Structures are given as structure tokens and as C-alpha cells.
């Protein structure tokens, strides 16, 4: 009797343990949340279930499905921050994605990682760290060490290369930069290496051999761009030299430290040393061959394919308008007087002067390594200046450019009447217009080829 009673108690205790198994409760709540599309809550329930029972297949499957949905949502939020240029929020959101991914992996679930965001994150992270770094240095210079320490701690959260950076030890800040810059230099990431060495030198100009490594970075990363004279394919002479001068000036003053522009005179000297002449460069293939012999990476070929300079006037034309006037008439049947508005056709003098400059330029950027045109385009630009000065021997405020319709007096033509009150002006000189058009084309071309070269 007593033995049977003990067995019953043991069975009841075992059943109680099963009924109180919290992992089953978590799985049940996770399943319910997943059915409602509440993947965040569902993933949390499955995660907690796996903490209690790591090999539960239902929890593993549930966390995989719901966790992927949660992670995808986190990446979408990261994308929104990128689009809105919210750098810090984007960086922190990406790290949140990584933290969530690692968290699930620790309980045996590997989520689907979105590799397409990795390159975007690296670019944003590097820019964010650079800005934070400059902020930290500024705070140090202002002796705001506690705030600076917080900034460097923020950097350390994002990039472990800065984990030893402290405000009180400048060398601890410089050393991670030095190591990273050296690695970048070694693998040919010259832009990143230069950025790191510049930061080190701003902290301590004599830190190790940073100046020498910076000079080596620029030397190894610099590429030569040979700019051939502009070819003029039009009948208007003299304009090609103006465009060429503006193009060289624009390329030289850009802020790319790795671009070395070789203009005509230097090209001629270098080619002469190789027993070559400028006249032999007539197409991309010959340009690539000559450029490679003199150590250039790219050759820029440019041609003016269309050019127009137009000037009309000053000239005076006689144009038609309509002058409103009042007339009193008697109404039929009543003979009562009534004032009506009538119009008469008149002529006014319009003196106008117009000046226009138009360029269409074709360019090719040729790689000396492949002899291929790596980028090309046709750029068009024009500048127009004109004025109209009108004169009417009468009441200008009564003038209309056309007759009324449907017996309705048209609204006041303010713009039309304003031209009668203008003061004669001088047009922009043809030389100034030509300069502005050449400058705009040079800036467009400069932007285009730098985008390619800096890839």
C-alpha cells in the first residue's frame, strides 16, 4: 500500500515537472506570435527556449524563420539611415545587425547575412570614424579630455583598431593608425594609408617614420595623366587653346593628391626623349603606346566637335501692339451715354541685342595599360545674353500685346510693359562668355574623369 502510494507521488511529481517546463511555454508563445506576424517577439521566445533546451528542433526552426525576418528588418532600417545620410545611426544600426546575428549564432542558429550591405557600411564607417576622430582631436586641443575620451570610446566600439586609443596617451592613438596605415600601404590602399598618416602627423609630426611612409604612399599611389592638346574639328580657330588652358588649370587645382597632370610642354619633352612626336598620337592606341613609354597611367584626348559664336544686333524692329482708349457712346433706345473701351492697332520700336557662345566637346580617357578607352562622353555647354529695350510714343500703360477675347479685357501685361522702362545694358563680352563656357566644360570633364580615376 505504502509502495503504491510512493509510486503515484513520483509519477505526479514527474508530470508536474513536464507541465512546468518553461521551454514549452516559450515555444507555444513563439508559435502564436509567429502566426500573427510578430517575428520580433516570436524570435525572443524561441531564443529563450533554446537557452533552456539548446537542441529543441521546433525552437531552432522557429528562430531561423523569425530571426531572418527580424534581421532583414534591421538591414532595411540601416538602408534608410544610409539614404538619409544619418551616419552615426547607420553605423550603430549595422552593429546592431551584427550583434543580433552573433546572438542567434550562439544558440545554434545561423541567420541569412545580407552581404550586399557590407561595402556600403565600410565606406560609411570609415567616414564616420574620420569625423569622430577629428572631433576628438578638437576636444583635446580645447582641453576637454573627458568629452574627448567619450568620443574615442565611441570610435573603439565601431573599430577595434582604436581599442587602445586614450586621450592621455597620444601614442596609443597614433599606433593603431600607424599599423593600419602601414597595412593599407602594403596592400595598395593608398587613399586609406594617406588618411591615416595625415592623422598621425597632425598628432605627432615625429611619430616613428610616418612622414617617410606618407611620402612613399603618395609616390606609389600617384598616377600620371597626360593631357593632349585639344583638337579643333570646327572652322573657328583659336578656341582650342583657350579650352586647353582652362582644362589644365582645373585639373591641376583639384584636391586629389595622387593625380599628376602632365600638360603639353612636359609631354613634348618626355616624348622627345623617346624619339617620339606629338603629331604621331592620333588615336587611343597610339596615345596608350606613347603614354606607357613615358610612364603615364592615363591619356586624355579632347576635341571640339561643334562651336558657335553668334551675335545679333543691336537692331531695331517695328512691332505691332494694341492701345486701349475710352469712347463714350449712346445706348440704343435710351440714348443714355456709356463709356466703352476700344483698341487701336499701333506700332512700337523694339531694340534688341543678343550674344551666344556654344561648345560641344568630345573626350576620351585612355588607359595606357590596356590601350582601351575607359570612359568617354560628349559635353555641351552654351551661354546666352540678350536685352530688349522698347519705345512707344504714347501711353505705355494702355498697351496690350494682343486683342481681347470674348469681349473680356485681358489682365495687365506687366512683363510686356516692363520692357519699355528698362535701362539699356551692356552685354557680357564675348571673351568673358567664352571663358565661362570653357570653365564649365573643364569642371564637368574634371568631375567625370576623377570619378573614374578614384574608383
Image: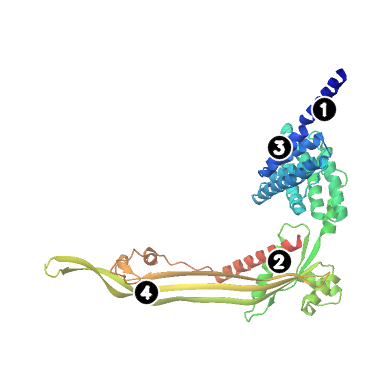
- Horizontally, residue 33 falls left or right of residue 61, namely left
Which numbered disc, 4 or 3, marks the residue that appears first in the sequence?
3
Which numbered disc, 4 or 1, marks the residue that appears first in the sequence?
1
Disc ID at residue 349: 4
| Label 3 packing within 10 angstroms: few (<14), some (14-19), many (20+) | some
| Label 1 packing within 10 angstroms: few (<14), some (14-19), many (20+) | few
Which of the 4 image quadrants contains residue 175? top right
Measured in 3D between alpha carbons, the distance from the residue under mark 1 to the one under mark 2, in whole angstroms, is 88 Å
Q: Are marks 3 and 1 in contact (CB under 8 Å)?
A: no
Disc ID at residue 164: none
Question: Residue drawn 84% across and 40% down?
Answer: 55
Residue bearing the label numbered 2: 248
* Vertical comparison of 216 with 283: above or below: above
Measured in 3D between alpha carbons, the distance from the residue under mark 4 to the one under mark 3, in whole angstroms, is 88 Å
The quadrant in which the N terminus is found is: top right
Q: Secondary structure at mark 3?
A: helix
Q: Nearer the viewer, mark 3 or mark 1?
A: 1
x, y (%) of residue 248?
71, 66
Residue bearing the label numbered 3: 29
Q: Nearer the viewer, mark 4 or mark 1?
A: 1
Measured in 3D between alpha carbons, the distance from the residue under mark 2 to the one under mark 4, in whole angstroms, is 47 Å
* Vertical comparison of 422 with 138: above or below: below
Q: Nearer the viewer, mark 2 or mark 3?
A: 3
Disc ID at residue 14: 1
Which of the 4 image quadrants contains residue 39? top right
Which numbered disc, 3 or 1, marks the residue that appears first in the sequence?
1
x, y (%) of residue 154?
75, 38
Q: Nearer the viewer, mark 1 or mark 2?
A: 1
Q: Secondary structure at mark 2?
A: helix
Residue 149 visible in rendering: no
Measured in 3D between alpha carbons, the distance from the residue under mark 3 to the one under mark 1, in whole angstroms, is 23 Å
Q: Secondary structure at mark 4?
A: strand
Amino acid at each position: 500500500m505504502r509502495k503504491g502510494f510512493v509510486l503515484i507521488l513520483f509519477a505526479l511529481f514527474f508530470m508536474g515537472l513536464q507541465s512546468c517546463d518553461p521551454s514549452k511555454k516559450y515555444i507555444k508563445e513563439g508559435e502564436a506570435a509567429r502566426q500573427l506576424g510578430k517575428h520580433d517577439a516570436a524570435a525572443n521566445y524561441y531564443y529563450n527556449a533554446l537557452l533552456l533546451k539548446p537542441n529543441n528542433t521546433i525552437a531552432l526552426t522557429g528562430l531561423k524563420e523569425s530571426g531572418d525576418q527580424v534581421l532583414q528588418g534591421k538591414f532595411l532600417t540601416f538602408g534608410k539611415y544610409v539614404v538619409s545620410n544619418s551616419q552615426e545611426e547607420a553605423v550603430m544600426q549595422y552593429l546592431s545587425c551584427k550583434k543580433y546575428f552573433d546572438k542567434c549564432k550562439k544558440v545554434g542558429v545561423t541567420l541569412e547575412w545580407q552581404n550586399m550591405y557590407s561595402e556600403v557600411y565600410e565606406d560609411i564607417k570609415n567616414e564616420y570614424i574620420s569625423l569622430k576622430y577629428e572631433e576628438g582631436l578638437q576636444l583635446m586641443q580645447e582641453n576637454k579630455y573627458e568629452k574627448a575620451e567619450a568620443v574615442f570610446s565611441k570610435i573603439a566600439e565601431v573599430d577595434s583598431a582604436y581599442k587602445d586609443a586614450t586621450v592621455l596617451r597620444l601614442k596609443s592613438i597614433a599606433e593603431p593608425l600607424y599599423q593600419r596605415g602601414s597595412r593599407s600601404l602594403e596592400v595598395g590602399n593608398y587613399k586609406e594609408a594617406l588618411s591615416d598618416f595625415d592623422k598621425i602627423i597632425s598628432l605627432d609630426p615625429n611619430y616613428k617614420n610616418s612622414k617617410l611612409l606618407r611620402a612613399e604612399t603618395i609616390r606609389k599611389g600617384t598616377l600620371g595623366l597626360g593631357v593632349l592638346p585639344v583638337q579643333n574639328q570646327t572652322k573657328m580657330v583659336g578656341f582650342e587653346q583657350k579650352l586647353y588652358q582652362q582644362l589644365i588649370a582645373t585639373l591641376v587645382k583639384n584636391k586629389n593628391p595622387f593625380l599628376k597632370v602632365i600638360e603639353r610642354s612636359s609631354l613634348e619633352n618626355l616624348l622627345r626623349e623617346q624619339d617620339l612626336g606629338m603629331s604621331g598620337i592620333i588615336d587611343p592606341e597610339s596615345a596608350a603606346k606613347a603614354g606607357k613609354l613615358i610612364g603615364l597611367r592615363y591619356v586624355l584626348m579632347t576635341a571640339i566637335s561643334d562651336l558657335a559664336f553668334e551675335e545679333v544686333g543691336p537692331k531695331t524692329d517695328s512691332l505691332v501692339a494694341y492701345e486701349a482708349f475710352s469712347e463714350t457712346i449712346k445706348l440704343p433706345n435710351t440714348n443714355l451715354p456709356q463709356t466703352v473701351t476700344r483698341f487701336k492697332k499701333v506700332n512700337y520700336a523694339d531694340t534688341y541685342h543678343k550674344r551666344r557662345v556654344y561648345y560641344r566637346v568630345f573626350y576620351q580617357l585612355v588607359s595606357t595599360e590596356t590601350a582601351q578607352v575607359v570612359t568617354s562622353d560628349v559635353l555641351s555647354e552654351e551661354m546666352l545674353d540678350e536685352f530688349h529695350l522698347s519705345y512707344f510714343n504714347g501711353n505705355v500703360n494702355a498697351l496690350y500685346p494682343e486683342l481681347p477675347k470674348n469681349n473680356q479685357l485681358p489682365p495687365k501685361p506687366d512683363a510686356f510693359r516692363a520692357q519699355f522702362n528698362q535701362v539699356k545694358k551692356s552685354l557680357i563680352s564675348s571673351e568673358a562668355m567664352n571663358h565661362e563656357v570653357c570653365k564649365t566644360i573643364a569642371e564637368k570633364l574634371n568631375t567625370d574623369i576623377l570619378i573614374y580615376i578614384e574608383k
